[in-house]
Image (spheres, rainbow, N blue to C red):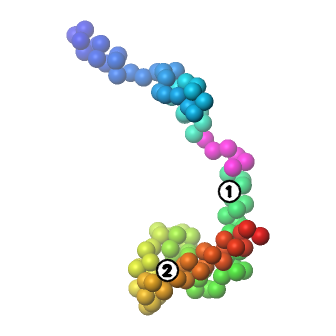
């Protein structure tokens, strides 16, 4: 009976137990990790603003076919992302052509986002 009790206690973990050290050699506890798992509100707002800007640029800069391919490829249309092969079959074009269109569209967006 004592053996079972000891075994059960040894498997328990406290929130204050050390689980390692950070890059500055400070002790990190489980509680520290759990507290820091929430996103910072400023980061969330910044991300949403960048996403909105990306969609606006997609509407202005890309041709319909480029926009459609990026939406399907990365699931921007709310559906599961598709492979280049799946998109090629749906559109009746080659996979390599889908790849070229995708690369060109991403390049256009990257250029616009830098400005």
Q: Earlier in the sequence, mark 2 or mark 1?
A: 1
In the displayed structure, 39 sits above or below 27; it is below
For residue 48, which quarter of the picture? bottom right
Residue under the point 49% across and 28% down: 20
Q: Which residues are magenta?
A: 38-43
Specify the label residue 97 is tagged with.
Answer: none
* Secondary structure found at label 1: helix
Residue 42 lies in the magenta-colored region: yes
Q: Which residue is mark 2?
A: 99
Specify the label residue 47 is tagged with.
Answer: 1
Give how far across and how far down residue 92 sits, in percent. Answer: 43, 91
Give how far across and how far down residue 39 sits, in percent. Answer: 63, 44
* Secondary structure found at label 2: helix
Give how far across and how far down residue 12 sits, in percent. Answer: 38, 21
Which mark is nearer the camera, 2 or 1? 2
Please rate how many residues cluster around mark 1, counting C-alpha atoms within 10 Å: few if below 14, some from 14 to 19, many from 20: few
Quadrant of the drawing holding the N terminus: top left
Residue farthest top in this picture: 2
Residue under the point 34% across and 22% down: 11
C-alpha separation, residue under disc 2 versus residue under disc 1: 27 Å
In the displayed structure, 39 sits above or below 74; it is above
Residue 25 lies in the magenta-colored region: no
In the displayed structure, 33 sits above or below 103; it is above
Q: Is residue 58 shown left or right of residue 97? A: right
Quadrant of the drawing holding the C terminus: bottom right
Residue 32 appears in the picture as rendered: no
Residue under the point 63% across and 75% down: 107
């Amino acid at each position: 009976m004592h053996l079972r009790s000891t075994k059960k206690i040894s498997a328990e973990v406290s929130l204050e137990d050390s689980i390692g050290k950070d890059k500055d050699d400070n002790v990190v506890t489980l509680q520290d990790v759990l507290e820091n798992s929430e996103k910072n509100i400023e980061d969330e707002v910044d991300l949403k603003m960048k996403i909105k800007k990306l969609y606006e640029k997609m509407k202005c800069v890309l041709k319909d076919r480029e926009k459609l391919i990026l939406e399907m490829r990365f699931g921007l249309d709310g559906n599961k992302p598709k492979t280049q092969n799946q998109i090629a079959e749906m559109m009746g074009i080659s996979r390599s052509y889908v790849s070229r269109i995708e690369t060109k569209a991403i390049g256009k967006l990257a250029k616009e986002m830098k400005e």
